[in-house]
Amino acid sequence: YADMAVHRAKAAGRATYYFYDGEMGRQFARNVRIETRLRHALQSESLEMHFQPKVDLISERCVGMEALLRWSDAELGVVSPAEFIPIAEQTGIILPLGEWVFEQTFRHILEWQEQGIKVPPIAINCSAAQLKRADFLPKLLALLDTYQIDPSLLEIEVTESILIEDAKGCAELLQQMSRLGMRLAIDDFGTGYSSLSYLKDLPFHYVKIDQVFIRDIVADKSHAALTRAIISLSHSLNLKVIAEGITSLEQLALLREYGCDIGQGYLFSMALGAHSMANDPMIAALNEQHSFDD
Ligand code: C2E
Ligand code: MG
Ligand code: MG
Ligand code: MG
């Protein structure tokens, strides 16, 4: 891989000086292995969807769940999506992988419904490369139809990166999805090149404040101020706010004080396997509450 690494370094431009070292080679070799194993994973049983509850901060009820990929490879062991999703995006694997995520999630929804579980809206993360495909929405609609799932049960989480690349094309797609009853969330808000005009012009329903802000919200006054500002701005544009990565009661208290609507984080629950869902107290509470009936 050394040759390729040097080639890449050269291709990166004259002004930047790179030198080849062991660490860079190891990183490159690992990425190539992840790519190879990931292609293999699509044909094996090593991928799984887990689901993390979203909690209404006032009622403390579960109001939805986020589908998150989990991968345990026979050779590499557990690999985090934070590591393999970027590689899937660079290599195009995200397209079949993204389809797998939708299909697998819909399969779980159907199973839960068959078990008599009331399923809250389920959020699925989508990469820019997926949304850019002309066949994205037709394929998604066909799949919803196959599994007889109502589009209003589906939430789509996208990051700002797509909006920067093709704001206009994206706006059209988001409008279509919104009209079909899907809910739309802008993910990791505050970390990218957040442009406030996205919030005004695009049909988002939710803003998800990135966990880096929540992590230091108690100790760091500037993170607290930013969080507060994002919440008030979002509310003035009629958007609901979801805080990611809540791990302490102190964070929760502050977020409530600021008027944040919804939370996610290890304080409430980590992402759970589809089969734990039937026994989860939060899901049980959801089923007593009858609010998703009509
Ligand atoms: P994300 O969409 O922002 O998801 C939130 C991440 O934060 C998840 O990591 C979740 O497990 C983690 N998390 C939740 N609560 C806490 C907490 O209290 N503390 C901490 N430290 N972390 C918490 P995960 O599952 O490793 O996913 C990382 C990223 O990978 C996701 O960020 C998302 O961008 C991407 N990803 C995961 N699954 C998929 C997928 O099916 N499709 C696509 N396109 N991307 C995915
Ligand atoms: Mg997300
Ligand atoms: Mg996020
Ligand atoms: Mg993220």
Image: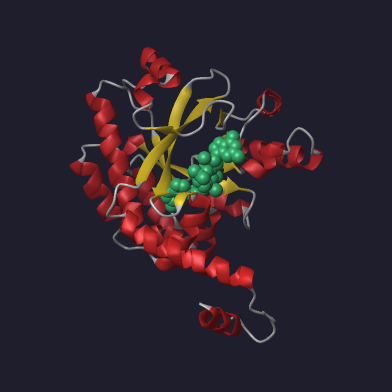
Q: Residue furthest left?
A: 146
x, y (%) of residue 141?
26, 48
x, y (%) of residue 135?
29, 60
- The answer to whether residue 275 is left or right of residue 250 is left
Residue at 54% x, 79% y is 2
x, y (%) of residue 206?
52, 39
- Corner quadrant of residue 112: top left
x, y (%) of residue 273?
39, 33
Residue at 45% x, 67% y is 32
- Corner quadrant of residue 227: top right
Q: Closest to the observer: 26 or 214?
A: 26
Q: Is residue 155 above or below residue 93?
A: above
- The answer to whether residue 119 is left or right of residue 168 is left
Numbered label tally: 0
Residue at 28% x, 39% y is 106
Is residue 239 shown to the viewer in this render? Answer: no
Residue at 63% x, 68% y is 23
Here the colouring is secondary structure
Q: Closest to the observer: 169 or 191?
A: 191
Q: Residue furthest bottom?
A: 14
Q: Residue furthest top?
A: 288
- The answer to whether residue 59 is left or right of residue 114 is right
Q: Closest to the observer: 55 or 88?
A: 88
Is residue 185 shown to the viewer in this render? Answer: yes
- Corner quadrant of residue 216: top right
Q: Is residue 27 above or below residue 250?
A: below
Q: Closest to the observer: 278 or 283?
A: 278
Quadrant of the image for the C terminus?
top left
